[in-house]
Image: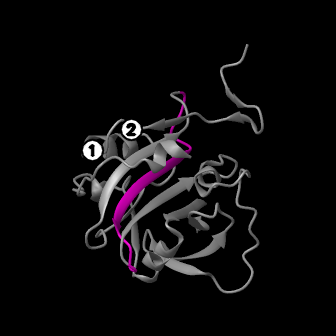
Amino acid sequence: MSSSWDCERHGPVHPVHVAPRPALEAVHKTAGSSGVPLWAPLPLLPGWTMTGLATAGDDRGPARATVMALAGPSPLGGPADLLLIAEEPGVGLGARFAGIDDIDPGLTAAGAPDAKVEAAGHPTALWRAPSADDRCAFVGEAMGVWLWAVLWPPAAELVLLEHVVLHDLRHVSHESVDLPIGAPSPRLTAA
């Protein structure tokens, strides 16, 4: 008898919880119960909305991974989706949403980064990570954990050319954050 969640391929895993609908109450609850950052680009890019939240972990401790789903216009036209994932090493949620079978990205950060964001006031390098053909993924490290950015369609990677400033919504200065809410993202349940 074990209280852990097990995957046939990966062994013990953390259960994933998807908020039933995007709402500010869910943002505040997730931020208050997480052991890793809950990243949000503030201000949001023009026309973008928050479309969902997910966490990995159980009720015995703080969340080991967080996901914020966002949707908006792609720089090349049409809709785009972005998942921002913060996770402890070994959780595997970023790899799951990237569409790969590994737990961690397995990167060797050689050469210049493929993208840069600002995370919690620090310049943060992101490198292209393996991903399924219908999306692109970037990964780096911020605040001691993995930071993933997974975008659909692949051309939406141009979003990262904007000056993206990520804030950790766990910080007290974001207790009253007000994000525009969009329709629930199918990306959180399709992975």
Pick the residue in front: 79 or 10.
79
Q: Which residues are magenta?
A: 60-76
Image coordinates of residue 29 in percent, x first then y, are: 34, 40
**Residue at the spot of label 2:** 19
Q: Quadrant of residue 142?
A: bottom right
CB of mark 1 within 8 Å of CB of mark 2?
A: yes
Which residue sits at x=60%, y=54%?
94
Q: Secondary structure at mark 2?
A: loop
Q: Residues within 10 Å of mark 1 (few under 14, many from 20)?
A: some
Image coordinates of residue 74 in percent, x first then y, are: 38, 73
Image coordinates of residue 98 in percent, x first then y, are: 61, 57
**Quarter the N terminus occupies:** top right
**Residue at the spot of label 1:** 23
104 with respect to 147 (left or right):
right
Q: Residues within 10 Å of mark 2 (few under 14, many from 20)?
A: some
Q: Secondary structure at mark 1?
A: loop
Residue 137 vertical position relative to residue 29 in the rendered view, above or below:
below
Pick the residue in front: 63 or 21.
21
Pick the residue in front: 37 or 132.
132
Q: Quadrant of residue 140?
A: bottom right
